[in-house]
Amino acid sequence: MKTNHKSAIGIRQSSPRHLSPMAREDRLTFWCFLSPWIIGFVLFGAGPIIASIFLSFTDYSLFNRPNWVGLDNYRELFRDPLIWKSLGNTLFYVIFVVPLSTAGSCLLAVLLNQKVHGIPVWRTIFYLPTIVSGVAMGVLWRWIFNPEVGLINTLLSPLFKLFAIDNPQWLLDPVLAKPAYIFMSLWAIGGGMIIFLAALQGIPKDLYEAAEIDGAGPVRQFFNITLPMLSPVILFSFTMGTIGSFQIFAQAYVMSGRGPDNATLFYVMYLFDQAFRYFRMGYGAAMAWVLFAIVLMVTVIKFKVAKRWVYYEGEV
């Protein structure tokens, strides 16, 4: 009984009614600083999210009242050939970009983690492309891929002449269009590099010292120490990269649009066309929720599989 009485006193003392004036002031300050985000999310985030759920079951074009159609929008999704085309293009992009950008960011961080004169300058140079907006990046790479005056064809023209290859029409060729986008995306791996660089600098040095004493070389240290210690960051990079790659839009919209034979018709671009070009808001909302379900499923699978290879420091 005595123990229960003390626990009851503890509960009573931790309740808001029994907080000291300073604790109440701190709690009020906390909610005041948090309130702009909460209000903004409720008004501009939660509201549209809830509305889109409702609109996905309606026929709505912005110019008339929503007409309830039930699951018709979702049934049409499975019959629309361009849905499967756009989803295939997006999956192709995700499958290549996410592993390549993660591996590139990791290897670049390892190189820029060396104690070499002028290394801060190189880190800045590799990070700079990440601050360029998607639209500006699209305009820049549209010029780079220009078949007549583009930088890539100009630099590679001796190689093309050697193999008797005409100037490739990068964004006008159904075969080369998607690889061109993959190549463009690797230009901005500096953001992931910064995250990997921070993780590398947090690895305890005594692990490498112990490995050297045991006779392990740089390659063995990389695979037995560096990669296991970086595995949580690799999982983070895979997850965020997948979510971002599924939503590719701005670069494709600026560079090639749908592309030749719909080769660059990515899922979000087709969603944009349906919702804001043809004003099929209900169909666009249904497409958005299908994309959410796909990304959620892929993310859950990644976290399930990650238990087998991700190492967290402190785990036995």
Image: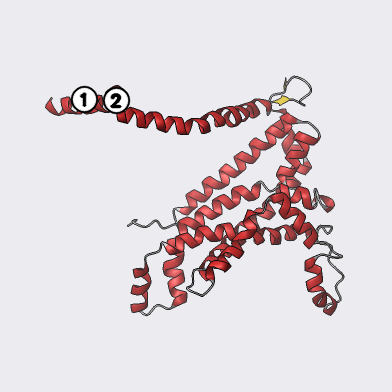
Q: Amino acid at mark 1?
A: Ala
Sequence order check: which comes first, mark 2 or mark 1? 1
Reading the image, the residue beneath label 2 is 15
Q: Quadrant of residue 201?
A: bottom left
For label 2, count other residues whose C-alpha is less than 10 Å away and answer few (under 14), some (14-19) or many (20+): few
In x, y percent, where is residue 47? 60, 27
Q: Quadrant of residue 213?
A: bottom left
Reading the image, the residue beneath label 1 is 8
Number of numbered labels in the structure image: 2
The quadrant in which the N terminus is found is top left
Direction from residue 120 to residue 224 in the image, left or right: left
Closer to the camera, 186 or 72?
186
Asked if residue 175 can be seen in this view, the reply is no
The quadrant in which the C terminus is found is bottom left
Seen in the picture, residue 65 relative to 166 is either above or below; the reply is above
Direction from residue 12 to residue 296 in the image, left or right: right
Seen in the picture, residue 229 relative to 114 is either above or below; the reply is above
Kindly state the secondary structure of the residue where label 2 is placed. loop
> Residue at horizontal 46%, vertical 56%?
232
Seen in the picture, residue 37 relative to 187 is either above or below; the reply is above
Q: Are marks 2 and 1 in contact (CB under 8 Å)?
A: no
In x, y percent, where is residue 226? 44, 67
Q: Give the distance between the C-alpha atoms of the residues marked 2 and 1, in whole angstroms.
A: 11 Å
Q: Amino acid at mark 2?
A: Ser
> Residue at horizontal 39%, vertical 28%?
28
Closer to the camera, 65 or 56?
65
> Residue at horizontal 56%, vertical 58%?
192
Q: Which mark is residue 95?
A: none
> Residue at horizontal 37%, vertical 80%?
215
Q: Extreme left residue here?
A: 2
